[in-house]
Image (tube, rainbow, N blue to C red):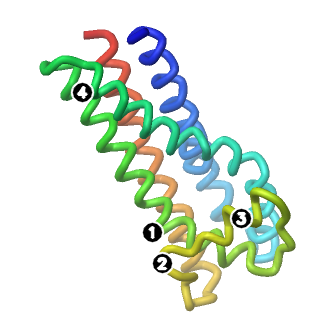
Amino acid sequence: MVVMLQVITLLAVAIAMATALAHALELPGKLRLSKDEYLTVQKIYYPGFTIGGAAEPLALLLLIALMFMTPAGASFWLTAGAFAALAIAHTIYWVVTHPVNNFWVKDVELKGAGATFFAIDLVGRPGDDNWTQLRNRWESSHAVRAALTITSLILIAAAIAV
């Protein structure tokens, strides 16, 4: 049972890391885009990345479950560290990234789960419509999230290996 939970948790953290890393790896190319090109490219993310993004809260729940099933010791603390890194990355998404997403899609007609997801507005949309500031905020948040999710993946892999 624990081994299966470890494998599923590792996979969920890896998927969460993959989406953040994919955004971070695009950064150099996206910085060369004009405003119109950038705004066009941004809209391609939401269907697939919304689905992939579901792995992140799932991974957090799985990490908590794994912490409860892991005895005190190195594995427990590595798992707790993996949870902390992923929880910080998830918080950054909701506080820094998601408000910019809401700004990017404000004129897009969304349906179904996408409409429900982007209706969530925890901290409000950014009031500044300076696209380069919004772009830099969005892109840098994903670079930080990539570093945190990579850290989480390394820590949970180490916890499983110990």
Label 1 to label 3, Cα distance in Å? 18 Å
Q: Residue at 68% of width from left, 67% of height from top?
A: 118
Q: Which residue is mark 3?
A: 116
Disc 1, disc 2: CB below 8 Å?
A: yes
Q: Would you call the spot at circle 1 few (<14 residues within 10 Å), some (14-19), or many (20 or more)?
A: some
Instruction: Give the percent coordinates (x, y) of residue 56.
Output: 52, 42
- Distance (Cα) linking label 1 and label 2: 6 Å
Which residue is found at the position 35% from the left and 52% from the top? 88
Q: Which mark is residue 95?
A: 1
Horizontal side of 76 relative to 3 (left or right) equals left
Q: Earlier in the sequence, mark 1 or mark 4?
A: 4
The residue carrying mark 2 is 123
**Mark closer to the chain start, 3 or 2:** 3
Q: Earlier in the sequence, mark 1 or mark 3?
A: 1
Q: Which residue is mark 4?
A: 78
In this rendering, the answer to whether 102 lies above or below 81 is below
Question: Are the two marked residues, 3 and 2, in contact with CB atoms closer than 8 angstroms?
Answer: no
